[in-house]
Image (cartoon, coloured by chain):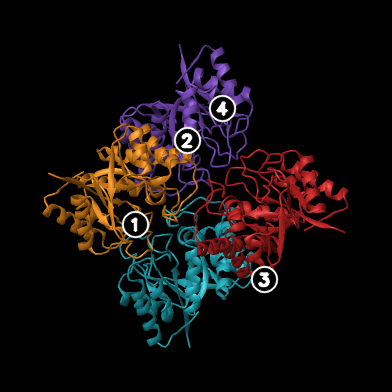
Chain colours: A purple, B orange, C red, D cyan
């Protein structure tokens, strides 16, 4: 029987500001990427999110990003690899401490936003992320785009890789995500997201926004928590997978 | 044979700004309280400091503070206990991850600045700090002023307490530190600091700046790293202790 | 004919996080207190908010607060008066530059949150705020609670005072606002807020949450922008005032 | 008689951390680029620095940078032009308010670090900086590398340009500064810096680190305040210029 993990970025509120549909998403996803206070979140939000994930039986991962709250970690910052290593290690440690307090284990690491995108091609940055995860502990899974520098770096660091697809985002035919402003870059319709999820899981491919198909073998599917309607899209994806006899679990 | 720990606050540089005499202090002290990025330090400084401490054979502790770089954690911020719990847990986790990468264990926790002073009398804040340390792991030592709310809270949380004295600071007769601006509040002279250290360790008391004596049973002595001449004072204290046949070790 | 100003705190979004009902409030109020990036807002949000206020014909003021985004400027920070002076001056300057770019003038200053409350009784802090406003320019109005240290400091600094009342907040009989957690501290019902506004403007008094009445002569009424339903409350207050032949203008 | 302005970056301390030789530089330079709290400085440091410059008769300019204290504004942040416009306007406003309190006028604007370098070639970023300066006030001078996108944008915005040279930095033959890590990139020797200053002012050229000469017409010379020995280099440059009958003034 085919199995797949369903993950979402959670804990992206900050201080008095709310973001995301965390409660609704925790009822649907199997893994949570929890913001660690650099691009979103703060220590109390992190702890509360981990506790809620633990209560919901959702597996917890760290979601480290650039230290850029105002830009939400979505814009490139020319941080050198040694700083990326230190920053990712720091954020993993903070998330792991929240897990200890909540009585669960930290299971995975997934870089956020611009750092994630940089790790597709930048071997030095990807290596810094993977080595930081390995320095923390050998069991951490690394979520990475299939074929990316990050996937390779994780293997080199001796860590298990979970190849990730985005059913709510459009792809270019070269395998990259379409820029957020491009037509078709963001898939809002739950049914369309569900169809794309099925393609990825059952066929290992998905149509590209610029024509043709992208080959894409995935172990985990991400639903973006900061788009409106995220919970509805995640639920539609999960229902479609289960209707196709795919087991959804971390 | 009497033994005493000698500790200093280290890793207090931030980004491009340098502070402290870390290298010189690491040659003298037996325990390092490493800033965790909230009142001072940053992830790379934290990691480098922990690595240096590990290389020097100096025991490593977390030095969590209020999230107030500009105020260096020295001014009171009305943070509620649940936020203090989350912030201290977060900082402990970040410091512990740096320790893992450096191949050593995190041994103790000591709150910084205004948070430390608040924990002398504020049972709710002290409880938050102690419970955060206990939530992280049962073995963490808590550095606390003798007789403080923090010392009591650590015992209640099941954690070992290390009672702390400050040979480079003046005390009031009620046991509190004299405010930094008061005459006699800061002891700059290495010989005077050494004499005060001997008093604390051998006699369990020290003269108060407002007359009389303060009774003070201590397990560890702190040399403030941000005062000029810290390393010279620490060395003088250590020499005096060893000359009096006191073993200096973590 | 009696006139009154109606003000609201605007521009309290930060980076990717939204807060408040700015557009709806700008259609109702006559003065905007615009966050300056210390407790809320950021330079782009500040500029866009000032432009929208200018387009709506709403008078613009600076709303300086403590540098504490995570705490939203609502918790006391022990900043010394010389730092308050510098911080308020800085924030006034930043807001005034946004006004220049939008082709309007900065008209008033109103401290935010914990700084506002500190300025009720703390003459040193109130003096720092008032002198910062006066150092910027002699024409700036200071919004202050009637009878407060801030009102006195503004007079001493040669600045016009606008005495402020809060129809959406409960008062204690000693004239202070009831703490936010206390029963009756937050008035959510638009009709009740409107009734309280009429009391303040026409009778110069309002019932206290702990019994009796509070005497309160006011020149301006504040509707809190961060409470849900703020725009509806502001509209109800305005309608009630205009129905009672009170002119609402800056 | 030939005249030249001598400028330095000042006010780069932050909270408890000191940087630079401000007092010594204020005795030598004729213009100060004062950090505005984004890459360095804080509101109190800004105000004190402006007051000191005013007392020393040194002309004051704003030195806006990326909001990146940890990176000291030295690394590229992918901020969009509308955000650069808002951020530069904000920092100019804050600096101008400090000038008002100090009884002087803000005279110029010079972007810092990575933002300065981006403005050499990136017309959108350069336009954002120049239009922000023009939105603040038509009289502000813009310090810019000769031939840069920033120099062109300032002219288009109707602002006076001051072409800038760096006697303490090596140039590539294409006119750009040599990267800080490259050999010859940083000129530490005061006499060498003085010789290079004379070349720039009297000959309009300077030897390139990669061979040949760089043509360079300049109106102002910058001495980097964060390099050790800055004041000695500035003094050597000034003496050499005056010995060559060049008038040094803002």
Residue lying at 63% horizontally and 63% vertically, measured from the top left: C97
Cα–Cα span, label 4 and label 2: 14 Å
Q: Is residue B151 left or right of residue C98?
A: left
Q: Nearer the viewer, residue A205 or C54?
A: C54
Q: Is residue B230 visible?
A: yes
Q: Could you confirm whether marks 4 and 2 are on the same chain?
A: yes
Dot 3 surroundings within 10 Å: few (below 14), some, or many (20 or more)?
some
Task: From the image, tell me which residue sits under label 1.
Answer: B172
Q: How many marks?
A: 4
Cα–Cα span, label 3 and label 1: 43 Å
Task: From the image, tell me which residue sits under label 4.
Answer: A23
Nearer to us of marks 1 and 4 is 1
For mark 2, give the secondary structure.
Answer: helix
Q: Quadrant of the N terminus of chain A?
A: top left
Q: Chain under label 3?
A: C
Q: Chain under label 2?
A: A
Task: From the image, tell me which residue sits under label 2.
Answer: A46
Vertical placement of C240 versus A230: above or below?
below
Q: Is residue B114 left or right of residue C45?
A: left
Cα–Cα span, label 3 and label 2: 48 Å
Q: Chain under label 1?
A: B
Cα–Cα span, label 1 and label 4: 52 Å
Q: Nearer the viewer, residue B99 or A209?
A: B99
Sequence-wise first label, 4 or 2: 4
Task: From the image, tell me which residue sits under label 3.
Answer: C158
Q: Is residue C202 left or right of residue B189?
A: right
């Amino acid at each position: 029987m085919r199995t797949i993990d369903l993950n979402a970025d959670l804990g992206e509120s900050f201080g008095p500001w709310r973001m995301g549909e965390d409660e609704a998403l925790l009822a649907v996803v199997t893994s949570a990427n929890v913001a660690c206070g650099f691009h979103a979140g703060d220590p109390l939000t992190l702890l509360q999110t981990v506790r809620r994930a633990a209560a919901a039986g959702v597996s917890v991962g760290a979601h480290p990003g650039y230290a850029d709250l105002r830009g939400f970690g979505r814009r490139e910052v020319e941080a050198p690899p040694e700083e990326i290593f230190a920053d990712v290690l720091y954020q993993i440690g903070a998330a792991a401490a929240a897990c200890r307090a909540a009585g669960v284990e930290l299971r995975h690491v997934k870089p956020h936003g611009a750092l994630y995108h940089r790790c597709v091609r930048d071997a030095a940055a990807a290596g810094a992320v993977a080595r930081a995860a390995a320095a923390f502990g050998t069991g951490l899974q690394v979520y990475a785009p299939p074929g990316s520098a990050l996937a390779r770096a994780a293997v080199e660091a001796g860590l298990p890789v979970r190849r990730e697809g985005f059913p709510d985002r459009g792809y270019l035919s070269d395998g990259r995500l379409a820029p957020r402003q491009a037509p078709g870059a963001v898939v809002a319709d739950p049914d369309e997201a569900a169809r794309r999820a099925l393609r990825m899981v059952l066929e290992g491919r998905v149509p590209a926004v610029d024509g043709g198909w992208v080959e894409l073998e995935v172990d985990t599917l991400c639903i973006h928590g900061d788009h409106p309607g995220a919970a509805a899209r995640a639920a539609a994806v999960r229902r479609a997978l289960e209707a196709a006899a795919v087991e959804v679990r971390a």
